[in-house]
Amino acid sequence: MLIISYDISDTKVRTKFAKYLSKFGFRLQYSVFQIKNSERILKNIIFEIENKYEKLFTENDSIIIFHLSGHCEVLKYGYARHNDDEYLIVL
């Protein structure tokens, strides 16, 4: 499972990103989506973020991907990559 959380200040970019994510999963909260995990889907989402959305970010925008599986991996984009706190995930 993937959990994708985002904080994007531009309304148009935020709306487009939410619509893009809704193709793959469903909204848990306003800026948090749950997506069924597959390597193809994850690669597609990362590609779109890196090639379309990240270049539109301001210094305060961020997307965080929680890749939950046998091992936990957190991918950070935008402002979120500067926050390297440890995470505790309770299921």
Image (cartoon, rainbow, N blue to C red):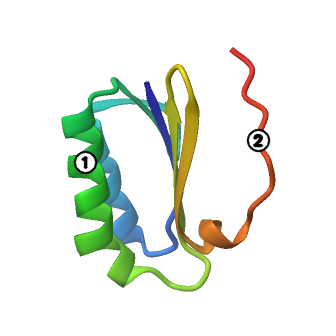
What whole-number distance in Å separates the C-alpha atoms at marks 1 and 2?
A: 23 Å
Quick one: quadrant of the C terminus? top right
Q: Amino acid at mark 1?
A: Lys
Q: Are marks 1 and 2 in contact (CB under 8 Å)?
A: no
Density class for disc 1 (Cα within 10 Å; few <14, some 14-19, many ≥20) is: few
Q: Nearer the viewer, residue 11 or 8?
A: 8
Q: How many marks?
A: 2
Q: Residue at x 37, y 75 (%)?
A: 54
Residue at the far top in the pictured view? 91
- Which element carries disc 2, helix, strand or loop? loop
Q: Residue at x 39, y 63 (%)?
A: 14
Q: Residue at x 44, y 75 (%)?
A: 10
Q: Which mark is residue 83?
A: none
Residue 1: image location, x then y, percent: 43, 24
Residue 63: image location, x then y, percent: 50, 59
- Which element carries disc 1, helix, strand or loop? helix
Q: Is residue 89 left or right of residue 72?
A: right
Density class for disc 2 (Cα within 10 Å; few <14, some 14-19, many ≥20) is: few
- Is residue 16 visible in this depiction of the protein? no
Q: Which mark is residue 43?
A: 1
Q: Is residue 87 left or right of residue 7?
A: right
Q: Residue at x 50, y 23 (%)?
A: 69
| Vertical relation: 14 (above or below) 52 | above
| Vertical relation: 61 (above or below) 7 | below
Q: Nearer the viewer, residue 77 or 28?
A: 77
Q: Quadrant of residue 21?
A: top left
Q: Which mark is residue 87?
A: 2
Which mark is first along the chain, 2 or 1?
Answer: 1
Q: Amino acid at mark 2?
A: Tyr
Q: Quadrant of residue 36?
A: top left
- Is residue 48 visible in this depiction of the protein? yes
